[in-house]
Image (tube, grey):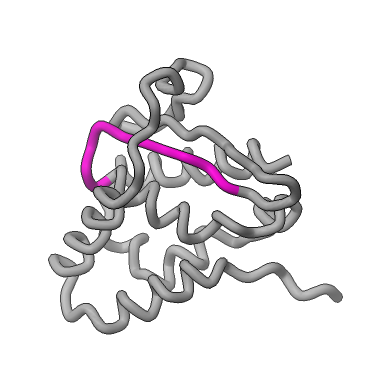
Amino acid sequence: MPTPPSASLAFEDLVETFAFLDDWEDRYRHIIDLGRAMPPLDEAFKVPALKVQGCASQVWLRPTPAGDTYDFQGESDAQIVRGLIAVLHCLYAGLPVGDVAAIDAPAQLARLGLTEHLSSQRSNGLRAMVQRIRETAV
């Protein structure tokens, strides 16, 4: 039985960072800082075809695979959601395209404790973003 693919090294680093942060206020700040550090998405890509449905905030994800390696750009009008996009970028970017759909995103994100600290709207939006990523990595 083949071993399922694991998260990227950047995500493993994020898991370690979260282990050192004492409380959720610090973790939220870190997520927001990750989002602020992401390059902005060019306005030309903020189009309906790249908009993620199911998010309370406006979210755009643009796949940018390079050969067999998956990558994407993303943006949101909400700081925390932009940070969640950065978390997903840590999880998926740099993986072989064929491994993206096999990543157990809920289990990986649970390692950060996100599932119990996000509102139901944010959780639904996060699931919609994961679904879009999986759909575009084919």
Q: Is residue 131 left or right of residue 126?
A: right
Residue 53 position in % (x across, y down): 45, 27
Question: Where on the picture, by quarter, is residue 43?
Answer: top left
Residue 39 position in % (x across, y down): 35, 42
Residue 135 position in % (x across, y down): 65, 37
Q: Residue furthest bottom?
A: 20
Q: Is residue 54 magenta?
A: no
Q: Residue furthest right?
A: 1
Q: Quadrant of the C terminus?
A: top right
Q: Is residue 91 left or right of residue 24?
A: right
Q: In this rendering, is residue 46 above or below 68? A: above
Residue in front for this viewpoint, 46 or 1: 46
Residue in front for this viewpoint, 70 or 77: 70
Question: Where on the picture, by quarter, is residue 92?
Answer: bottom right
Q: Is residue 60 left or right of residue 40?
A: right
Q: In this rendering, is residue 75 above or below 4? A: above
Q: Is residue 77 magenta?
A: yes
Residue 67 position in % (x across, y down): 74, 46
Question: Where on the picture, by quarter, is residue 114?
Answer: bottom left
Residue in front for this viewpoint, 67 or 92: 67
Residue ID at (67%, 45%): 66
Residue ID at (68%, 52%): 69
Q: How many discs appear?
A: 0
Q: In this rendering, is residue 81 above or below 31? A: above
Residue ID at (38%, 52%): 86
Q: Which residues are magenta?
A: 71-80
Q: In this rendering, is residue 40 above or below 22? A: above
Residue ID at (39%, 42%): 124
Q: Quadrant of the N terminus?
A: bottom right
Residue in front for this viewpoint, 15 or 94: 94
Q: Is residue 87 left or right of residue 37?
A: right
